[in-house]
Amino acid sequence: MNQVSASQLGTLKETVGRYGIWSFGMRAEDPEGATERAEAAAELEELGFPALWLGGSPGVRHAVPLVEATSRLVVATGIQSIWDYEAAETASVYAELEASHPGRFLLGLGVSHAGMAERYRRPYASMVEYLDALDAAGQPAERRLLAALGPKMLELSRNRAAGSHPYLVTPEHTAQARAALGETPLLAPELKVVLDTDPDSARTTARGTLAMYLTLPNYTNHFLRIGFTEDDFKDGGSDRLIDAVFAWGDDSRIRERVDAFHTAGADHVTLQVVEDRSRGALPREGWRRLADLLK
């Protein structure tokens, strides 16, 4: 049974709005970049983005300086691996941040991948155990989301969290996720954006990012479930696959792709700008362009 009320979900949806930014670089820990990350978070708030999602299995502590550098921005983990942080520690740091900055943090959780987490085992059962531990420690279900691709994890997102933050998905999957979640839980898919109008170079940039994900069975099995084939995984991804999971092109084409997720049932779309450079760099000019085209 869902632990989260419709009114709590309505408030959450209003708080995070329709669009957010997803970034590996904003999760970084190097002290030299702390000032730029704080300035970038403040600029995202000024640009009108209500939410920032931290990539790379961030913990709650990664969100603290970004929350402190802003006044309204909701900072979310996208996604914290349950293998990297104990539930009791997560709940404790969450409570500290919630006490000092109420309503400014959203806990995104996921089970990661067998090839990336040494402790990986029984992913669904382990997530249930982790949620049980969070409940026991007092971390509220209305302030967490689950990275859910398949039907069992989507059901868990509906019953034990405020909704789902699916990564590397299509509008077709978003429609399936909305049907599984029902009308009220928050559905916040991630969408990668390449700000390039040339088909060849845009797809080349996209393949540079997608190639790693195509080595992970959780994603390839997901793609097979939603209608792709093994042929779509060759050479870094077929044009069909690239065009389904990336938005690229001019402003109108990118806006059309973003809108397709909302039409399919997304409440909030979190946008990851992908560039042909180190994934730790902050694509701040790209964020500014997104802010303009989403107006």
Image (cartoon, helix red, strand yellow):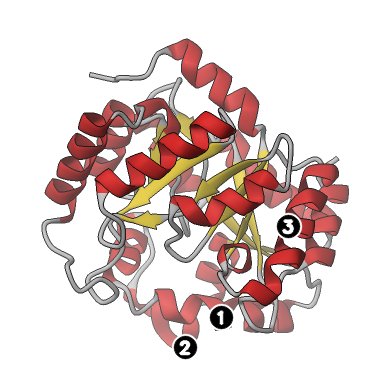
Residue 97 at x, y percent in the picture: 51, 38
Figure check: 15 above or below 146: above
Closer to the N terminus: mark 1 or mark 3? 3
* Residue matched to label 3: 38
Residue 281 visible to the viewer: no
Does the residue at mark 2 contact the one at mark 3 (Cβ under 8 Å)? Answer: no
Image mark for residue 207: 1
Dot 3 crowding, Cα within 10 Å, few <14, some 14–19, many 20+: some
Q: Please state if 86 lies on the left or on the right of 19 as rendered.
A: left
Quarter placement of the C terminus: top right
- For the residue pair 222 and 19, the one nearer the viewer reads as 19
Report which quarter residue 129 is drawn in: top left
- For the residue pair 290 and 74, the one nearer the viewer reads as 74
Report which quarter residue 57 is drawn in: bottom left
* Residue matched to label 2: 235
Report which quarter residue 260 is drawn in: top right
- For the residue pair 178 and 19, the one nearer the viewer reads as 19
Does the residue at mark 2 contact the one at mark 1 (Cβ under 8 Å)? Answer: yes
Q: Amino acid at mark 2?
A: Asp
Q: Please state if 57 lies on the left or on the right of 281 as rendered.
A: left
Q: Secondary structure at mark 2?
A: helix
Q: Amino acid at mark 1?
A: Arg
Residue 165 at x, y percent in the picture: 45, 45
Q: Please state if 204 lies on the left or on the right of 151 as rendered.
A: right
Q: What residue is shown at x 35% (from left), y 70% (from top)?
A: 229
Q: What residue is shown at x 53% (from left), y 46% (from top)?
A: 76
Residue 30 visible to the viewer: yes
Does the residue at mark 1 contact the one at mark 3 (Cβ under 8 Å)? Answer: no
The mark closer to the camera, 2 or 3, is: 3
Disc 1 to disc 3, C-alpha distance:
30 Å
